Amino acid sequence: MQLPVTRTPVQARYSDTDAMGHMSSGSYVTFMEVGRLDFFQQIHAQTGHSQASVVANINVDIISECRYGENIEVLSWCSRVGNKSLTVCNEIFANGRLVAKGSVVNVGFDTETRQSTAIPQNWKASNYSDSSGN
């Protein structure tokens, strides 16, 4: 199954800004999390399967300033599916311009044994390349 590409609007809060009046660096991680949750909910809607996972790695590149009051949208897709992990990529847009991008490695997790577990074998990376063509 080809994994989805999702677009998620995000409601930024005034408290997401820092002393300089732009979004704080931690807010981008939160925006990515909101997009990732929507991504996994879409998988569940398509398959009826909920894959528990834990975050193993987060990378974020802040490209441009984002300010409170801008319309924020997070694009999410899967760039890689391994045996026990997958990489979910995100692009964060403010008023239509790319302001940040990042990726998160999620590891399949068995909530009963508290151990890593395999990702479904039929999962395939999303059919999407980021805005830079990668």
Image (cartoon, helix red, strand yellow):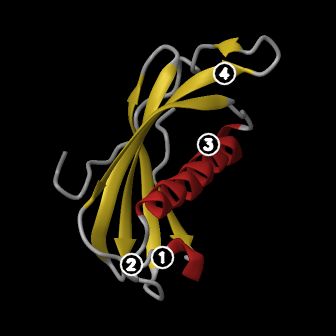
132 or 47, nearer to the observer:
132
Q: Quadrant of the C terminus?
A: top left
Specify which label sits upstream in the sequence, 1 or 2.
Answer: 1
What amino acid type is highlighted by mark number 1?
Answer: Thr
Say which mark, if any, is on residue 17: 1
Provide the secondary structure element on which disc 1 rests: loop
State the separation of the CA atoms marked 4 and 1: 33 Å
Asked if marks 2 and 3 touch (Cβ < 8 Å), the reply is no
State the separation of the CA atoms marked 3 and 4: 16 Å
Say which mark, if any, is on residue 79: none
The residue singled out by tag 4 in the image is 109
Q: Residue at x 62, y 14 (%)?
A: 116
Asked if marks 1 and 2 touch (Cβ < 8 Å), the reply is yes
Q: Position of residue 41 (x, y in %)?
A: 66, 49
15 or 131, nearer to the observer:
15
The residue singled out by tag 3 in the image is 43
Q: Residues within 10 Å of mark 3 (few under 14, many from 20)?
A: many
What amino acid type is highlighted by mark number 2?
Answer: His
Q: Is residue 89 above or below residue 119?
A: below
State the separation of the CA atoms marked 1 and 2: 5 Å
Q: Position of residue 85 (x, y in %)?
A: 49, 22
Say which mark, if any, is on residue 22: 2
Provide the secondary structure element on which disc 2 rests: loop
Q: Position of residue 56 (x, y in %)?
A: 50, 28
Residue 57: image quadrant is top left
Left/right placement of residue 22 relative to residue 45 reads: left
What amino acid type is highlighted by mark number 3?
Answer: Ile
Instruction: Give the number of the mark in front: 4 or 1.
Output: 1
Instruction: Give the number of the mark in front: 3 or 1.
Output: 1
